[in-house]
Amino acid sequence: MVIKDVKFSETMSENCSVVVGVYSDGSLSSGSVSLDADGEISAGVKKLGFCGKLFKTDSFVSCNKKINHVILVGLGEKSKEFSEFEMEKLGATIYCAAAKLDKEISVLISGADVSFKCAKYGTSLMALGFMLKSWDFDKYKTKKCECNKKNLQKAMFITSEYAAVESEFAWFRNLADGIFLTREVVSEPANVIYP
């Protein structure tokens, strides 16, 4: 299964899980500060002892009726300069943390929250890493274990530059489709590839 429903918006979806970035000093990513008006997320970070170490994740159930789960993702030091690979890895980390929790997530981390050369490009790379991690080849599996079932179907990346990011991401979406095709071809047995 591949998650193709990756979108960008200025507002978050309702009745979904929310992904929040946490720096190593305990502060939250800029997109999630307004969501933490009642202090629930900050209290959850402290209660879990989440230190914001880079690429570490944790989650808790929210008391807010519009949010099912809060997924915490460590962003490390605020001054850390992210590479392109690390932006993709951040997206993959988000997918791994959210895949089994809910059908839809809103990601409140954008390229502007990390030290990266271009905010809209960073958000696109994060979404690309998210999509690439979602790929799974189970065509020939006879037993599908329910414990490994992934519920996630849709991701919404929240950013103020959503229109620019959406147009930037069109190229990345085509790149991901090419990568998925290549992965499927090399995963097929020889009698299917060469008739």
Image (spheres, helix red, strand yellow):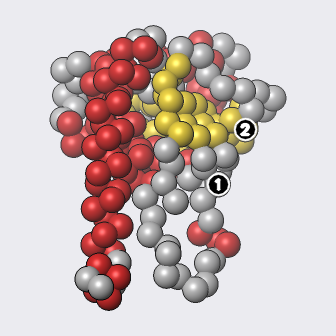
**Disc 2 packing (10 Å; few <14; some 14–19; many ≥20):** many
| Disc 2: which residue | 68
Q: Residue at x 35, y 57 (%)?
A: 180
Label 1 to label 2, Cα distance in Å? 13 Å
Neighbourhood count class around disc 1 (C-alpha, 10 Å): few under 14, some 14–19, many 20 upward: few
| Residue pictured at 22% horizontal, 32% vertical | 82
Does 147 appear above or below 120?
A: below
- Residue 178 position, x and y percent, is 29, 51
Q: In the image, 175: left or right of 4?
A: left
In this view, which residue lies farthest toward the right? 65
Percent from the top left, x then y, of residue 185? 31, 69
Please give the name of the residue rendered at 59% of the width and 69% of the height, measured from the top-left corner.
148
The amino acid beneath tag 2 is Asn
Which residue corresponds to mark 1?
151
User: Which is nearer the eye, 123 or 135?
Assistant: 135
Q: Is residue 131 left or right of residue 182?
A: right
Q: In which quadrant is the C terminus drawn? A: bottom left
Q: Nearer the viewer, residue 54 or 114?
A: 114
Q: Is residue 121 visible?
A: yes
Q: Give the secondary structure at mark 2.
A: strand
